[in-house]
Image: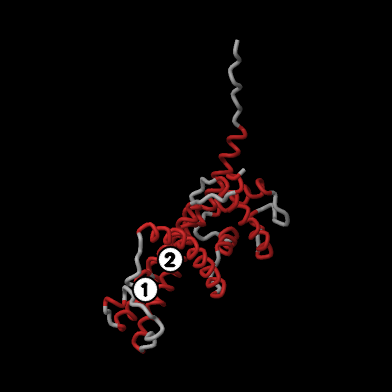
Amino acid sequence: MLNAGTRRFDLYDFFSIFIPGAAVILGLLPFYPKNMPTPTGATVAIVIIGGFVVGRGIHAAALWAEQQAGAVTHRQIFRAELKDPSCLSPDLAREFYDDCLDAFEPENLPEKWENLGSKHDDELDALYTLVRSYIHMDARGRSRTFQAVLDFYRSIWVGSFVVAVVFMGYALFSELGALNGIVEYQTYYGSLGVPSSITFYGAVFIIGGAYGTFERVRSDYREFYIQYLFSDFVVLQADRTHTSQTPQTPPPQNK
């Protein structure tokens, strides 16, 4: 009963939630008090537990930032590719659509793939949710891996931005002397004596480098994701059909 009600930790949680959260915690370690005792076990526990907590916050912040910026969503790409394929072949889009009609029997969708239009966007959004749920429950689709990597890139970019902003703020306040009387302890980073200008421009470099490394490469992985989303569903449906049509061999009778 417990297993049935407990959510399973999966690849998506590890890549898109835990790793970005742990990266932020480790990135902020230089601002911890220098003389504070840090037992190894406690540090590991903080990174593991805090990684999930901070990672959830980063994930939510990344989703909010994308919505505010009007970024293209997975659903929008799904609709565009299904109606007018660009990185897919029309044959794959047609076969995918026919399999969706057979599997889910959705209402208010045309019987022919060629008749899809903008008036069907709401129904296609619902279809995307059904397909994702089906692939996730089957747990064999390669698109799950690419979705985890996609959201990992987004979260790690936001996490890098947060850490860099903290370093930039630290450099500015240190240069202005605003930290005197506010921070009553010496940090690990402060004990190194790094000039504020190097800290500030180094943080700017981190923001630019993280954007170029993690954010821009998402476009390539998003294309792979949508390709595998369509092909995963088609392959899983073909396997299901083949299994249902294969005659079952009766067990041998004991004589």
**Amino acid type indicated by mark 2:** Ile
Q: Residue at image x 51%, y 51%?
A: 9
Q: In which quarter of the image is the N terminus?
A: top right
For label 2, the residue is: 156
- Compared with 245, 148 (above or below) is below
Query: Which image quarter: residue 29?
Result: bottom left
Secondary structure type for disc 1: helix
What is the CA distance from the residue labelled 2 to the residue labelled 1?
Answer: 20 Å
Q: Position of residue 32 (x, y in %)?
A: 37, 71
Q: Where residue 149 sits: x, y (%)?
A: 45, 58
**Amino acid type of disc 1?**
Phe
Instruction: For mark 2, give the secondary structure.
Output: helix
Of all residues, the one furthest to the bottom in this rendering is 176
The residue wearing badge 1 is 31
- Residue drawn at x 36%, y 89% is 176
How far across and down, in percent of the image, does residue 211 sit?
40, 71
| Label 1 Cα crowd, 10 Å radius (few <14 / some 14-19 / many 20+) | some
> Which of these two is toward me, 17 or 143?
17
Foreground tag (2 vs 1): 1
Residue 123 higher or lower than 204, as above or below: above
